[in-house]
Image: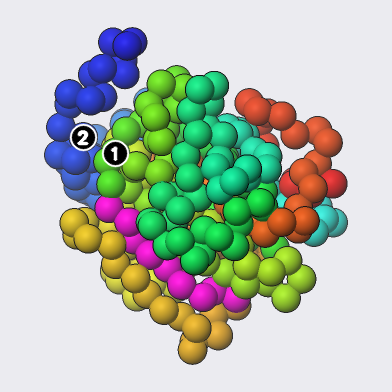
Amino acid sequence: MKPAILLQYLIPKQALTSLAGKLAHWPAGSLTTRFIGWFVRRYQVNMQEADNGDIASYATFNQFFTRPLKAGARPLATANMICPVDGAISQFGTIEAGQLFQAKGHHYSAQALVGGDASLATTFAAGTFACLYLSPKDYHRIHMPCDGTLLHMTYVPGDLFSVNPTTAAHVPGLFARNERVVCTFHSTTHGKFVMVLVGATIVGSMATVWHDGPDHIINPPRPHQPVHWDYTQQAIQLKQGEEMGRFLLGSTVVMLFEEDVLTFHPSWHAGKPIRLGEAMSA
């Protein structure tokens, strides 16, 4: 086992993530500005795209990290499905007998990914999936790949391994063992689909635009049992390209679609950089 992977098994990931979340919310004045400046240089963040390019104006690191883009920075392609995030394609393809491909020698089940809901997982048993990785430099708001009506949301407690490509290649069932938020939608055109926001080391929080917590944040708190919300009576409808959530520090989105709904764009391949609004479907 690589030392970097072994270290992840040994370090107190929950404690580190909790501390990182608190620091990212801390308005530390010039210290915050200096750290943001270092982060922009270290990860080559393109602040020309940000709605507010003045790093000194961000009171906290999280305000900077979840910064909105300028209007028109991500035009939407004319496609049935669009990329919901900036990032890179980790993996994508057909769900075979309920199994998703993670990396060479590693698969995980749709049922485990969605928190053990066998009925929901069966919907996608022969469908398609896309796993999209957001790196530190990326825009960290998540948008809708198509129109959808929110049905349910489930917080699934779990581990907090890194989700970078190296870790994905070495930690079995990574995306189904990390902390995650499972959002289930229905589309009149595309049937039922799921967007799973996967947490990771140092990912302090995840938020959805409809959640009624402070700043729409779902975690923390981090209960030890799954928490389920039912929205079937609330008619929460989101349009293609509309924001649905965000990561407070970066991670991964896994999407599940029913059989015969999505044919991926021919330019797609594992490792390909993607941008919000590009065509995901052929």
Residue furthest to the front in view is 97
Residue 186 location in percent, x, y?
62, 72
Residue 268 location in percent, x, y?
75, 34
Quadrant of the rendered image containing residue 101 = top right
Question: Which residue is pictured at 37% across the width and 26% down the height?
Answer: 171
Is residue 252 a member of the stretch shown in magenta? Answer: no
Split into 4 quadrants, where in the image is the N terminus?
Answer: top left
Residue 253 location in percent, x, y?
51, 47
Indicate left or right for 8 with 232 as reference.
left
Q: Amino acid at mark 2?
A: Lys
Q: Is residue 248 above or below residue 149?
A: above
Quadrant of the rendered image containing residue 11 = top left
Res 13 label = 2
Indicate left or right for 121 with 157 as reference.
right
Q: Is residue 113 above or below residue 20?
A: below
Tags 2 and 1 in contact by the CB under 8 Å rule?
yes
Question: Which residue is pictured at 54% across the width and 21% down the height?
Answer: 104
Res 241 label = none
Q: Is residue 258 visible?
A: yes
Q: Is residue 182 above or below residue 149?
A: above
Label 2 to label 1: alpha-carbon separation: 6 Å
Judge by depth and name the residue closer to the eye, 146 or 21: 146
Magenta stretch, residue numbers: 149-157
Q: Amino acid at mark 1?
A: Leu
Res 160 label = 1
